Image: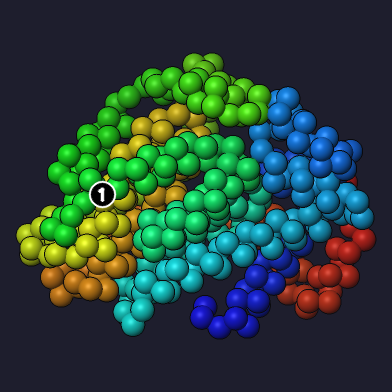
Amino acid sequence: MKSRTNGVVFIAFCTLFGFSFAFSNDSADSYRVALVFNEFNYQSIYDIYQLYLLGGAPDLYRFLTYAFLKSFTDNPKILFASFGLVFGVFWYLSMRVFKKEQANYSGFYASLLFFLFIIINPITNINGARFNTAIWVFFYGVINVVLYNKNRYLLLVLCAPLVHFSFLFGVIVILLYVFIKKFTYSNTGVNNLLYYSFIVSFIASWVLESNIISLDFIGSFVPSDSISNKIGTYNSSEVADIYKERASSSPFLMVSNFFQNLIKIAFFTILIYLKRELQKNSVKDLVINKMLAFVFFYFTFSFIIATMPSGGRFLMVGYLFALIVILMILREYENYLNSRFVLLLIPAYSFTFFFNVIFLSISITSKTIWYGNLLWIIYEGWDYTFIYL
């Protein structure tokens, strides 16, 4: 990951992976994205911005990409190659952060944490294009602000809602943290009020009704009617009822929700264990306490946001931050800890691995990427025309 050549090869693979999408399943997000791209007829940046302001688009990333590519191609494979390129750049930059924090720490648990870091939001997730790309944009911006004190990366954090509107919530949380961070930790540990708020929020997330908190006030602070309309829709009781009905009637969603809850419990347990062990051993580490306090702060809000329809996706970003702080603690204080606590995450992420990584890799891409050569893959898809199913 430290080599620039390796980075170029990695990003090129992500681009190629996007180019290999097959669009043969009309239930896949990628098929619906390709369909909209095929029918898209805006080429003026001004028109797209007006569409954004007037409620026709909740964010700019996808439509601006459409407009640029439509000037020379209608091929959805090139569209997803561009999605893979952008996703790959920020995924690679984020993995470099992990490797930087890993430093000279090696062994089974370091490898396991890196593996989990990769599969939480893998390249197959460009299937949905916007949200999962925004995850890596947001993560890379935030980690530079919080861990490395590079406040100029707040500009990157502010760009995340332009990739997916829902990261407006994340921006609000980060801006709030920036203003109060000096009160959240000290050299001796995490602020007790923050720690107990983290615990209360976790407990409350299991008992609160969906959309119990009104978020309509956020709409008054944004320039786009699309965003305020989207917030109103997701924050409505009607949408909450639809999601609840789907979750109770779909075997797939029932299994998925079970494992998501298992992941949530595993991370909560691990973070509580680490906090207590650091306190018991009187560890004084300002950097680690700062990062641990931020993770508690982020989850305190994310547990509540997760009660909203689709809000659980914000926990994915929190898990990435949590893996970084777990890595930092093991790197410095593994002798004080029972490292086997990390093994809790293996069964928790088994469904994510087999579905998001294995199944989606096979089902949404052309089989050529697995047995063909580079030229064959490009030849097969260069003149591809979208087919309505």
In the rendered structure, which amino acid carries the disc numbered 1? Lys
Nearer to the camera, 48 or 247: 48
Question: Which quadrant of the structure image shows residue 14?
Answer: bottom right
User: Which residue is the site of mark 1?
Assistant: 182
Vertical comparison of 159 with 227: above or below? below
Dot 1 surroundings within 10 Å: few (below 14), some, or many (20 or more)? few
Count of residue discs: 1
For the residue labelled by badge 1, is the local secondary structure a helix, a strand or a loop?
helix
Which residue is depicted at the point 45% across and 29% down? Answer: 308
Going by the image, does 338 lie left or right of 3? Answer: left
Nearer to the camera, 248 or 93: 93
Residue 249, position in %: x, y? Answer: 51, 28
Vertical comparison of 370 with 203: above or below? below
Question: Which quadrant of the structure image shows residue 180?
Answer: top left
Q: Quadrant of the C terminus?
A: top right
Residue 295, position in %: x, y? Answer: 32, 50
Which residue is depicted at the point 17% across and 39% down? Answer: 193
Vertical comparison of 86 with 67: above or below? below
Mark yes or no: residue 243 visible: no
Mark yes or no: residue 382 visible: yes
Which residue is depicted at the point 87% across and 43% down? Answer: 43
